[in-house]
Image: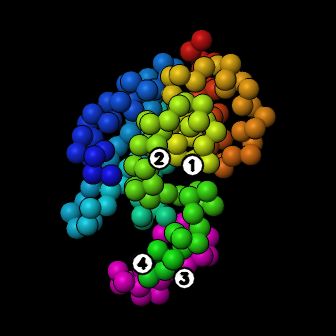
Amino acid sequence: MSKILKSWSKMRKYLEKEMLADSLQGIVRYNCTTYAGMDGCHIFENFFDDELFKQFSWETVNSYFIKMGYAEKPTQMTIAYYWKDFWGLVDKYPIDKRTEYTDEEFAEALEKYRQSDIKDSLRSDNPIAKMFALLDRRVGKRTLEKMVDSINLEPEWIQQVFEFRIREERRNG
């Protein structure tokens, strides 16, 4: 992940200017935040129309585990207690079995997306790589139209990305 973060401004430019579909220019934004004391962890975010769409961090994944009942709701607010089940649950519920993802998973998916053919990213089992592909300028209206029936098999948040892209394509042309 360090490769992405060492040049986050370049990566952000790539995501927002170079790869983004014309219809999404200026309305899709990415952010990366690091807080002191986070031991190298980051929060990646993407925004659609200036609204937070999705966060990618350990915290969002752990909160998801608690919300889904996979982890106990903390009765003690110690760091060790809060995170005690995290790694076992990440192993038990891999990326294709949940709807929240870590910063590392975001960075790995971005790297995979950048190194793959766009068609492979659209068919990827990795939902984050698929998100990048759905927002990509190389994916045209005809390709999106072909996906209308199959998109219902994807996680709800991917369906929302797809619907956002379709709406913006129609709005712009």
Look at the image and tell me whether residue 51 can be seen.
no
Mark 4 nearby-residue class (10 Å; few <14, some 14–19, many ≥20): some
Picture coordinates of residue 37, whole percent (x, y) = 22, 68
Distance Cα–Cα, label 3 vs label 4 = 10 Å
Q: Earlier in the sequence, mark 1 or mark 3?
A: 3
Distance Cα–Cα, label 1 vs label 3 = 27 Å
Callout 2–callout 1 Cβ contact below 8 Å: yes
Q: Earlier in the sequence, mark 4 or mark 2?
A: 4
Picture coordinates of residue 11, whole percent (x, y) = 32, 36
The residue segment tinted magenta is 62-83
Q: Earlier in the sequence, mark 3 or mark 2?
A: 3
Callout 1–callout 3 Cβ contact below 8 Å: no
Q: Secondary structure at mark 3?
A: loop
Quadrant where the image shows the C terminus: top right
160 to 61, vertically: above or below: above
Residue wearing tag 1? 126
* Tag of residue 72: 3
Residue wearing tag 4? 83
Question: Mark 4 is on which residue type?
Answer: Trp
Q: Residue at x 60, y 20 (%)?
A: 140
Residue wearing tag 2? 109
Quarter where residue 162 is shown: top right
Distance Cα–Cα, label 3 vs label 2 = 29 Å
Picture coordinates of residue 81, whole percent (x, y) = 41, 85
Q: Earlier in the sequence, mark 1 or mark 4?
A: 4
Q: Secondary structure at mark 1?
A: loop
Quarter where residue 57 is shown: bottom left
Question: Mark 1 is on which residue type?
Answer: Asn
Mark 2 nearby-residue class (10 Å; few <14, some 14–19, many ≥20): many
